[in-house]
């Protein structure tokens, strides 16, 4: 896996495919029906789209491609996701019905993309950044495929990281809670060690209430109830669901 978007962009630059495919605002009907200039041009077109997507990714940077804080673990997931998107784009274009319907009429791909209310705009559904203010049809298709692959790799990876953090935090909270409960029990043991005569009825009732025990009865009953709670023979009252 390549280590950064910069590495990817450098490879495209050295291979001479870093220039985005040409596009015009519009074509005449005759121009739209024209075939590729050569087989080489047809073969180079998806590589040009790929280079354009990588260049746009480098332009957006880590913060522009997603909405998470810049952390080493998130950035590692980001780099991996970009690599997956690069690797999958050629195959995704080959499998895309719209792209395949237009591939033998190159100027349909090169013409400016015009949004329509009935178009299925995958990037908008994903909350993706746009490829540009005026992408070609080919660029629009490629960027949607590229960003979809990126998202489907990146988001599950960071979700698992955050779930792991939540599990860790929950374990820490549980340990702290158990430690505090044990401290309260120790405080109660110390209080009861002086015997029932050293305690007041009000204080015993308050202790019973704090530990979820019944508060009715004499001092002796309350004292025994608290002792039973500490040795496990008396359980707290079940709380009513609201």
Image (cartoon, rainbow, N blue to C red):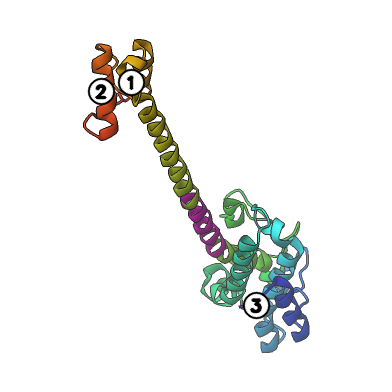
Determine if residue 13 is in view. Answer: yes
Residue position for label 3: 2
The residue closer to the viewer here, 196 or 101, is: 196
Question: Total marks drawn?
Answer: 3
Q: Secondary structure at mark 3?
A: loop
Query: Which-is-in-front pick, marks 3 and 1?
Result: 1
Indicate which disc, 3 or 1, sits on the residue closer to the N terminus. 3
Q: Secondary structure at mark 1?
A: helix
Q: Main secondary structure of the magenta part?
A: helix
| Residue drawn where x is 70% and y is 76% of the image | 8
Q: What x and y, as percent, mark residue 220?
A: 25, 15
Query: Which-is-in-front pick, marks 2 and 3?
Result: 2
Quadrant (top left, top right, bottom left, bottom right) of the N terminus: bottom right
The residue closer to the viewer here, 62 or 230, is: 230
| Residue drawn where x is 66% and y is 58% of the image | 71
Indicate which disc, 2 or 3, sits on the residue closer to the N terminus. 3
Residue 228: say if magenta: no
The alpha-carbon separation of the residues under discs 2 and 3 comes to 67 Å
Q: Which mark is residue 208?
A: 1
Contact between marks 1 and 2 (CB within 8 A): the answer is: yes
Q: Quadrant of residue 217?
A: top left
Residue position for label 2: 225
Q: Secondary structure at mark 2?
A: helix
Q: What x and y, as percent, mark residue 167?
A: 46, 51
Indicate which disc, 1 or 2, sits on the residue closer to the N terminus. 1
* Highlighted magenta segment, given as a residue range: 152-167
**Crowdedness near tag 3: few (<14), some (14–19) or many (≥20) residues, C-alpha within 10 Å:** few
């Amino acid at each position: 896996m390549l280590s950064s978007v910069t590495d990817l962009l450098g490879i495209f630059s050295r291979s001479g495919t870093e220039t985005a495919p040409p596009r015009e605002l519009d074509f005449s009907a005759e121009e739209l029906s024209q075939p590729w200039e050569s087989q080489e041009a047809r073969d180079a077109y998806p590589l040009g789209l790929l280079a354009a997507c990588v260049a746009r990714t480098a332009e957006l940077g880590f913060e522009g491609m997603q909405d998470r804080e810049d952390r080493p673990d998130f950035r590692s997931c980001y780099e991996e996701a970009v690599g997956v998107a690069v690797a999958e784009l050629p195959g995704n274009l080959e499998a895309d019905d719209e792209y395949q319907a237009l591939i033998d009429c190159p100027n349909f791909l090169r013409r400016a993309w015009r949004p329509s209310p009935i178009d299925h705009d995958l990037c908008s559904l994903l909350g993706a950044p746009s490829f540009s203010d005026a992408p070609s049809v080919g660029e629009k298709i490629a960027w949607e495929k590229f960003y979809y692959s990126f998202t489907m790799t990146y988001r599950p990876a960071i979700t698992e990281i955050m779930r792991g953090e939540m599990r860790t935090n929950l374990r820490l909270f549980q340990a702290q809670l158990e430690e505090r409960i044990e401290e309260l029990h120790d405080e109660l043991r110390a209080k009861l060690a002086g015997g029932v005569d050293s305690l007041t009825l009000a204080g015993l009732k308050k202790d019973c209430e704090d530990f979820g025990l019944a508060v009715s009865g004499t001092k002796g009953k309350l004292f025994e109830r608290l002792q039973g709670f500490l040795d496990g023979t008396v359980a707290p009252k079940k709380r009513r669901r609201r």
